[in-house]
Amino acid sequence: MLALQKVRPAKGVEFREIGVPEALAPRDVLVRVHSAGICGTDLHIAEWTPGYESMERAMPVTLGHEFAGTIERVGEALSETIIGTRVTARPSTTCGRCDACLRGDEDNCTARKGIGIGRNGAFAGFVCVPYDNCHTLPDSLDMDVAALTEPMTVCAEAVATAEVQPGQTILVIGPGFIGQGIAIMARAIGAKVVVIGRDDGPRLDALRAAGFEQLIDTAKTDIASALADLAPFDAIIEAAGVPALVSATLPYLKKRGIFTVVGIHPRPAEIDLTSVVRMHQQIRGSYRAPAADWDGVIAFLDANQPLMRQLISHTLPLSDALTGFQAAQDRVASKVVLRMGEP
Ligand SMILES: [Zn+2]
Ligand SMILES: [Zn+2]
């Protein structure tokens, strides 16, 4: 089967012809992939930005960790009755052997392996994953939309970390897919949402089409004057990974407000901590959502399919993946979804 792989610790990704996995671990399932999304992480891996050095041990490794498909085969410890089940999967697999895992504290597993990072992922016709990482999809949920589950759990976790409440005014920094998903989740709670981007015309247009009105492109408007009219914000959620935007927006957070960081930053941000102290504010990080939140996010996607489908700007066959990577890199794409079944 065709697979999009990271082959060496340098810039680039490669298409390679690999075998469909034969032997499965006892609790693993082989999933026939239908749809798989391209994520910012995949772009970082392709560009080989620092922070992914540990992948070298797994190379050549198939990328792709946001996916939906159908169980095709099962390991010997599993019942064949689950064959044909439509699933998505949590990409972070735990080892089951470290001290934390043996204590039942899997969230602190010290030997996690990411599907599509530390073990083969879903940019291929089939992917082998632990069944315990799988979540069943409702029949009514479209596979392309189901492939958005993992990034939307990141968004749901960010909104929970920010303690977004009905009636609040929230600033979201960065209109990429994660920023878009955060805006949607915060609005669903009943918050008023403002989103800022820079040279992000197509992504802000996607948000406008999704019904958002308070959208600021800082390439066209001065950030200070634009925010001064809308501030203070009850919470600010940062999903751009631009350190300068942390210090530029913090003055618009209200007293006791929460600033949540979701973006991966290439360098430290400089912030006025004395102001944070006097304003009694909190700065929080938000990353992976707990497993218990996944089914709720799947239900949200199922209930909001037309809206979520709008955020898929490109659907391409796997063989056109590099076109999708470029569109995401150029920030014209909101979310690119690859379809494995298409030539
Ligand atoms: Zn991702
Ligand atoms: Zn472990």
Image (tube, rainbow, N blue to C red):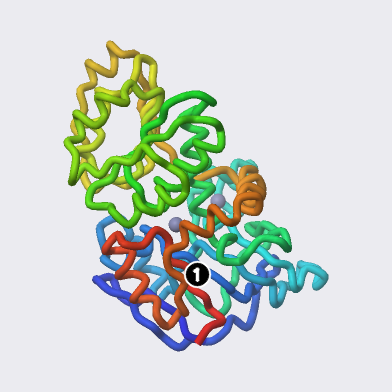
Is 196 left or right of 310, judged from the image as shown? left
Question: Can residue 220 be seen at all in this image of the molecule?
Answer: yes
> Residue 90 appears at what percent x and percent y?
57, 56
Most foreground residue, 39 or 58: 39
Q: Residue at x 36, y 29 (%)?
A: 259
Callout 1: helix, strand or loop?
Answer: loop
Q: How many marks?
A: 1
Q: Is residue 117 visible?
A: no
Q: Nearer the viewer, residue 159 or 31?
A: 159
Q: Residue at x 60, y 50 (%)?
A: 304
Image height of 146 relative to 175, above or below: below
Q: Is residue 72 left or right of residue 301?
A: right
Q: Determine the image quadrant of residue 203.
A: bottom left
- Residue 65 pos. (x, y %): 49, 63
Neighbour tally class for label 1: few under 14, some 14-19, many 20 plus, Cα within 10 Å? many
Q: In this picture, is 294 found above or below 71? A: above
User: What residue appears at the point 28 percent right and 18 percent down from the top-left corner?
Assistant: 276
Would residue 80 be found to the left or right of residue 331 on screen?
Answer: right
Residue carrying label 1? 121
State left or right for residue 242 relative to residue 142. Answer: left
Q: Nearer the viewer, residue 52 or 340?
A: 340
